[in-house]
Image (tube, rainbow, N blue to C red):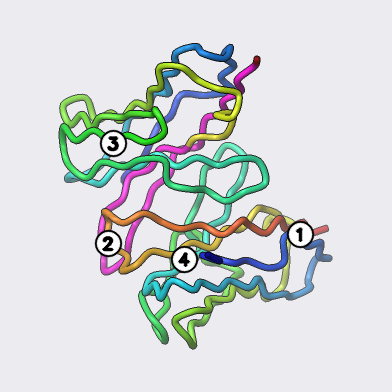
């Protein structure tokens, strides 16, 4: 029962570097999303996808790119890392993205940008 | 816009004490309501949910009732255990423009001492 798998678990970047956070799910879920978790702010939606080839922006998309070439994978790219992107990142999925469905979360990536 | 307000933590209780974590929301319409739990070093996982007014969600001894008249979804447990120590997030969910728009509260940290 893998569920939602995120890699890496920890990452340290220098300002200006780029990197990709990986997310994969094995539940054939249509809906996938990326959140960032910051102290005192709960979780905020970065980008989401309702199916392969379809992505859209969430609440805080600036500085991030996504693509969805397969149902299983939804990578998040940081184009030029900034200290403000220091956060814990969670990938989440649900079966069809309906409001009454629960989200399945990965275990998170802790990112520090120096 | 939509918002979720949770009581500030941390909340510290002795084992077997009664737990209440308050959650109120502001939303246009009737969202689905959720409680998620996050154990140290892990992603969020669904604890319980309710999808319409007066529904009661329950799981592992935790309960919450969807109260439309007071726009609340308070989490309760009659007798907490040390293993319940975690961060608890209240959330509401709508379908908005084709995606699952989930708004999270800021989280309440619970510490249960033996």
Name the chain under label 4: A
Tell me what residue is drawn at x 83 percent, y 65 percent.
A14
Q: How far apart are labels 2 and 1 at the CA level?
A: 31 Å
Tell me what residue is drawn at x 41 percent, y 37 percent.
B90
Residue B13 lies in magenta, yes or no?
no
- Mark 3 or mark 2, which is nearer to you? 3
Residue located beneath label 4 in the image: A33
- The tag earlier along the polypeptide, 4 or 1, is 1
Task: Please provide percent x and percent y for residue B30.
Answer: 18, 44
Residue located beneath label 2 in the image: A98
Please give left or right for residue B90 compared with residue B64 in the image.
right
Tell me what residue is drawn at x 25 percent, y 29 percent.
B65
Q: How far apart are labels 4 and 1 at the CA level?
A: 19 Å
Q: How far apart are labels 1 and 3 at the CA level?
A: 35 Å
Residue located beneath label 1 in the image: A10
Magenta segment, which residues?
A: B89-113
The quadrant of the picture occupied by the C terminus of chain A is: bottom right
Q: How far apart are labels 3 and 2 at the CA level?
A: 18 Å
- The tag earlier along the polypeptide, 2 or 4, is 4
- Mark 1 or mark 3, which is nearer to you? 3
Query: Quick one: A37 or A51, which is closer to the camera?
Result: A51
SS at mark 4?
A: strand
Name the chain under label 2: A
- Neighbourhood count class around disc 2 (C-alpha, 10 Å): few under 14, some 14–19, many 20 upward: some
Task: Please provide percent x and percent y for residue B114.
Answer: 65, 15
Whether pointer 4 and pointer 3 mark residues with C-beta atoms closer than 8 Å, the reply is no
Please give left or right for residue A113 compared with residue A38 in the image.
right
Q: How far apart are labels 2 and 4 at the CA level?
A: 13 Å
Q: Which mark is residue B57?
A: 3
């Amino acid at each position: 029962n893998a569920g939602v798998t995120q890699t890496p678990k920890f990452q340290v970047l220098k300002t200006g570097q780029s990197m990709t956070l990986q997310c994969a799910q094995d539940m054939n879920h249509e809906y996938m999303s990326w959140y960032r978790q910051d102290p005192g702010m709960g979780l905020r939606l970065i980008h989401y996808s309702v199916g392969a080839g379809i992505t859209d922006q969430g609440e805080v998309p600036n500085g991030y790119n996504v693509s969805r070439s397969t149902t299983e994978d939804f990578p998040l790219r940081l184009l030029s890392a900034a200290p403000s992107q220091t956060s814990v990142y969670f990938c989440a999925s649900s079966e069809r993205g309906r409001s009454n469905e629960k989200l399945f979360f990965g275990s998170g990536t802790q990112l520090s940008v120096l | 816009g939509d918002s979720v307000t949770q009581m500030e933590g941390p909340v510290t209780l002795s084992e077997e004490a009664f737990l209440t974590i308050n959650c109120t929301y502001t939303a246009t319409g009737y969202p689905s309501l959720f409680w998620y739990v996050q154990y140290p070093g892990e992603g969020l996982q669904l604890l319980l949910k309710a999808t319409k007014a007066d529904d009661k969600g329950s799981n592992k001894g935790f309960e919450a009732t969807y109260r439309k008249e007071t726009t609340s979804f308070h989490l309760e447990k009659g007798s907490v255990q040390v293993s319940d120590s975690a961060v608890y997030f209240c959330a509401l969910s709508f379908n908005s423009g084709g995606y699952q728009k989930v708004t999270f509260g800021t989280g309440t940290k619970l510490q249960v001492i033996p």
